[in-house]
Amino acid sequence: MRSWGKPPRATFQDRGLCPIKYDVCNKNFSPLMRAINRLLQTLLPIRCWVSLRSTQPTNMFPIPNPQSPIPNPSLSQVHQILLNYHDSHLAIQCCLFLIMVNDTEYIHQDAATRVKVLSEALPYIQQFAGRTVVVKYGGAAMKDSNLKDKVIRDVVFLSCVGLRPILVHGGGPEINTWLGKIGIEPQFKDGLRVTDAPTMDVVEMVLVGRVNKEIVAKINQAGGNAVGLCGKDGNLITARHQGQEGIGFVGEVSSVNTEILGTLVESGYIPVVSSVAADDTGQAYNINADTVAGEIAAALGAEKLILLTDTRGILENYKDPSTLIAKVDIKEARDLISNGIVAGGMIPKVTCCVRSLAQGVRAAHIIDGRIPHALLLEIFTDGGIGTMILGSQLGF
């Protein structure tokens, strides 16, 4: 019998705590074990049984009975068994096969679920093909790396199925981090960032130079074609002072150059817009990203404006997520603001939704960006997950 070599002796603790220790890079690992290692890495996602049979069992690790295989073993378990039974005179048979009865049922259920999801999504994909969807990206979805990846994939998916997504982003948490590094305390008034000259410099540096380019790179890595812009680029957005006292260089949108965005989306690109713009004199302004998203959606006559937030939507009681208001019209939304139900940082969000609807956007959505794939759930499912604001009761 050909000798496959033998790994160095190790204690049970060594193998138990570090089962990957003798991996494919270990020159003392036999070719057979390297091949099995690679196979296991490949098959790890598959639900399987493992059955091992040895002609020379050892006392270090009890070998499983071939007639009583281990259900759904972890990679570590399999590595431990293989390492303990690796010997030049040892015949190991590693049999991996799908669980016949249970997995057949599992696969059928999984397939049925997939078919149901696709079937439910199809009418929406057909309805919204070629339509513009403006997404405001911010909050927890920008801080959590897993959520960030899912949002990026969702945006690329929208583009792949024929929608025309435009991503407008904030960057509040990162702005706060950089302000802290230079000793500036972040301040807010009515949900808007108070922006003096030093703060404005940091806002522009972070939003335009860091956050925007990171998002563009991630979209491109996920298979999309993204182009990063700020309001200054090509006079995309002309700003003016917001008019409120004591908030510094906080602006609002005076006009939007739709030609640039139209050219990009018609060519299959995904515009990624940061909310920094300048007025006619060149003075830079920090504009609330929700406001920018709403004005872009209005200028383009978008099908949808979607705001990703850190709340489920508009709540009758902000302390109780179960009080979500699923649908409102413009009048009801304004009443919610005047009655104080919508307050704080939610005010500019609802206000920009109302303004965009009044200017021709068909529907606005405030959804919880902390939910994985929130965009797809809101657009392509019957129930949705957040608050939809419509122009009139006719949309109900």
Image: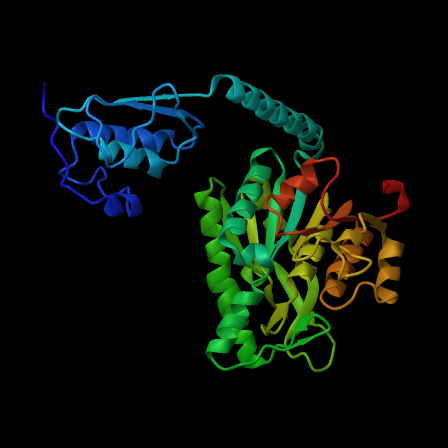
Where residue 80 sits: x, y (%)? 29, 37
Q: Is residue 394 visible?
A: yes
Identify the coloring: rainbow
Identify the residue at image location x=82%, y=53%. Answer: 358
Q: Quadrant of the N terminus?
A: top left
Identify the residue at image location x=85%, y=41%. Answer: 395
Where residue 333 sits: x, y (%)? 84, 57
Location of residue 29 (image quadrant): top left
Location of residue 76 (image quadrant): top left
**Residue 356 relative to residue 199: left or right:** right
Where residue 7 sits: x, y (%)? 15, 37
**Is residue 89 positioned above or below 180 on the image?**
above
Outermost front residue: 59
Q: Quadrant of the C terminus?
A: top right
- Which one is nearer the viewer's eye here, 310 or 82? 82
**Residue 72 relative to residue 167: left or right:** left
**Residue 36 relative to residue 263: left or right:** left
**Is residue 136 positioned above or below 131 on the image?**
below
- Which one is nearer the viewer's eye here, 365 or 16? 16
- Which one is nearer the viewer's eye here, 26 or 160? 26
- Which one is nearer the viewer's eye here, 39 or 126? 39
Identify the residue at image location x=78%, y=67%. Answer: 343
Where residue 162 sits: x, y (%)? 61, 34
**Residue 188 relative to residue 314: left or right:** left
